[in-house]
Amino acid sequence: LAETYWSTGALDDALGTLDSANQSLAIAAEGGTGLRLGQLRLLTVSVERNADAGRFENARVYAGELAKQAAALRASEAKDSRVPVRGEILETQARALIAAAGGDWRAARALSSEGASRAEAIQAREGSDTLWKFALLTNTNQLKAESELALGDFASAEQSARAAKAAKDQLNIEPVVDGRTQAYLSTLLAAALAQQGRIAEAKAVIDPAVKFNRDLAARNQGDELQKLELAAALYAQALADPSRRAALLRESRGLLAGLPGPMKSLATVRTWTRRIQDASA
């Protein structure tokens, strides 16, 4: 429910729902390792959403609770358990998300890089290990790519986006969800390639992502985040298609202008808005 509120621009309702869910799961998490891992995932989402909305005090409170629960998980598991590292990577990722939302891209890159390295080292011996490994690799490398794009390190952003896409290839959740994630990762990859002057490669990557987003937009019923994803993809396509650059950027700006007022203040939206405005100058 929180994610539904968030995607439609009802940010206060989304954050309030997350608060309630955290209160409920804090009690349920005493039921064992699986529930505690669920609590850690929810805490990470809560950090991300609060930081994105500029509510850094709340984000840091949730990050502190995440660190506390990750330490409790470590203390409750056997010394040779492969489970606690999952919580520790989430705790590192939470700090990276706060840094990114605050514009500290160097810290975000360093922390997401640390998380990605630890996730890569996970020895996947059973189903849950595999799912966690590739989910963590997708998320940490995505944020790392975003940070490197912001820092102008386009070669590194390319490698991080490719790593995120490769991990996501191994993680199937639901066709539309998977398609949206892959399309966004393609946006990051194409932008990195285009900024290195590799226009043909960028175009080959971004054109299918734009088609996917346009097809999704044609049947979109109130998902404002999808408009942001399409706007970002059009930005990358503009970089890869000089003959249509002005028109694509104009369309991208129009999509962002049409977002609900509260969403325009989100750190993620402001980042893409600045990027698109700079490309339009």
Image (cartoon, rainbow, N blue to C red):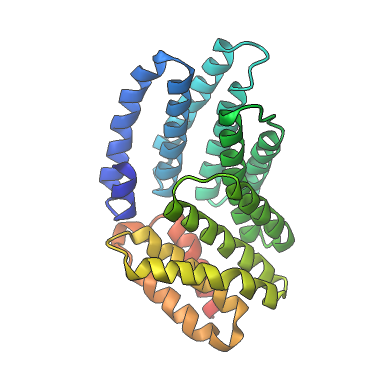
Residue 103 in sight here: yes
Image vertical order of residue 60 relative to residue 72, above or below = below
Image vertical order of residue 177 relative to residue 137, above or below = below
Residue 256 in sight here: no
Looking at the rendering, in which quadrant would you find the C terminus? bottom right
Residue at the spot 49% in from the left edge and 52% down from the top edge = 178
Residue 30: x percent and y percent? 40, 14
Q: Nearer the viewer, residue 87 or 98?
A: 87
Q: Locate residue 145: give its quadrant.
A: bottom right
Q: Nearer the viewer, residue 124 or 185?
A: 124
Residue 62: x percent and y percent? 43, 31
Residue at the spot 38% in from the left edge and 76% down from the top edge = 254
Q: Nearer the viewer, residue 238 or 210?
A: 210
Q: Locate residue 263: give its quadrant.
A: bottom left
Image vertical order of residue 77 relative to residue 21, above or below = above
203 left or right, relative to 4: right
Q: Nearer the viewer, residue 64 or 239?
A: 239
Residue 58: x percent and y percent? 39, 35
Residue 116: x percent and y percent? 66, 40
Residue at the spot 43% in from the left edge and 39% down from the top edge = 45
